[in-house]
Amino acid sequence: MKKIILLTLCLMFGSFTLTGCSDSNDPFSEKEYTADVSQIKEISIDVRDRQIEVSRSEDGQIHIGYFENNKETYDITVSDENTLTVTSADSKDWTDYIGVKPSAEVRKISLQIPDTLLDTLTLSTTNEEISLPALAVTGSIKISSNGGNITFGNLNVRDSLTLTVKNGDISGTIAGSYDDFAIQANSKKGKSNLPGNKENGEKMLNVSNNNGDVNIEFIKEPNGAVGK
């Protein structure tokens, strides 16, 4: 009797495993969302297990490229306050997490931003990296990755820059001089070229990393840039 019960349980588990693998192979389709930059003041992307790659838009509009299937989708909305929000809207069962994860190509979100300045940019993901080009905003930038690196070009902020990573590195350049920023940097299990605390500065730089390195350089921007 015990052997029969064990055999039945094994068959049931095997069935769940096959089901999970089948669902994970549900084909993805490529999609794009376009927004008029004049209608957007803030962009917020909060997703799971997705690489976020930011680049410059060539046509003056905001473009978001992504992949969806029946189980893995996104909610994309624009609020009355002109905030463009992208969030994960997965409808997975626990069996869908069994098997091979989707290819790197479909686990990527591309965000194209024009030269027209945004007020605020917020990006957050897990288990993947976030990369940004040289970029200026009239307010703040906040970037977070749990399980991936953050890399960036010359980031130019008027108010604050917040960078948070667990199990990954932070590296890039910031527009402005070292003296422009008050700094709060908390680094565990890694190297950092920033002081833990620096009080003086018109802008704020907050950096937190656990199990990774921090390497950030400051580049003096031209007079009259948004950062001044």
Image (cartoon, grey):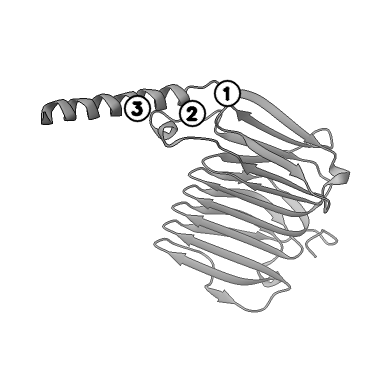
Whole-Å distance between the Cαs marked 3 and 2?
Answer: 16 Å
Helix, strand or loop at mark 1: loop
Q: What residue is rendered at 67% in x and 53% in y?
A: 122
Residue 216: give x, y in percent of width and height. Answer: 57, 59
Residue 37: give x, y in percent of width and height. Answer: 84, 43
Quarter occupied by residue 197: bottom right
Residue depicted at x 73% and y 73%: 202
Q: Which residue is mark 3?
A: 17
Sort mark 2 into few (<14), some (14-19) or many (20+) by Cα contacts within 10 Å. few
In contact (CB < 8 Å): disc 2 and disc 1: yes
Q: Which amino acid, mark 1?
A: Phe
What is the spatial separation of the Cα atoms under label 3 and label 1, in whole angstroms?
21 Å
Residue in the foreground of this view, choosing between 98 and 8: 8
As drawn, the label of residue 150 is none
* Quadrant assignment, res 106: top right
Residue 189, position in %: x, y? 39, 62
Q: Which mark is residue 102?
A: 2
Q: Looking at the rendering, which quadrant does residue 12 occupy?
A: top left
Mark 3 or mark 1: name the one nearer the start of the chain: 3
Dot 2 amino acid type: Pro
Say which mark, if any, is on residue 28.
Answer: 1
Tell me if mark 3 has few (under 14), some (14-19) or many (20+) residues whose alpha carbon lies within 10 angstroms of its own.
some
In x, y percent, where is residue 164?
A: 55, 58
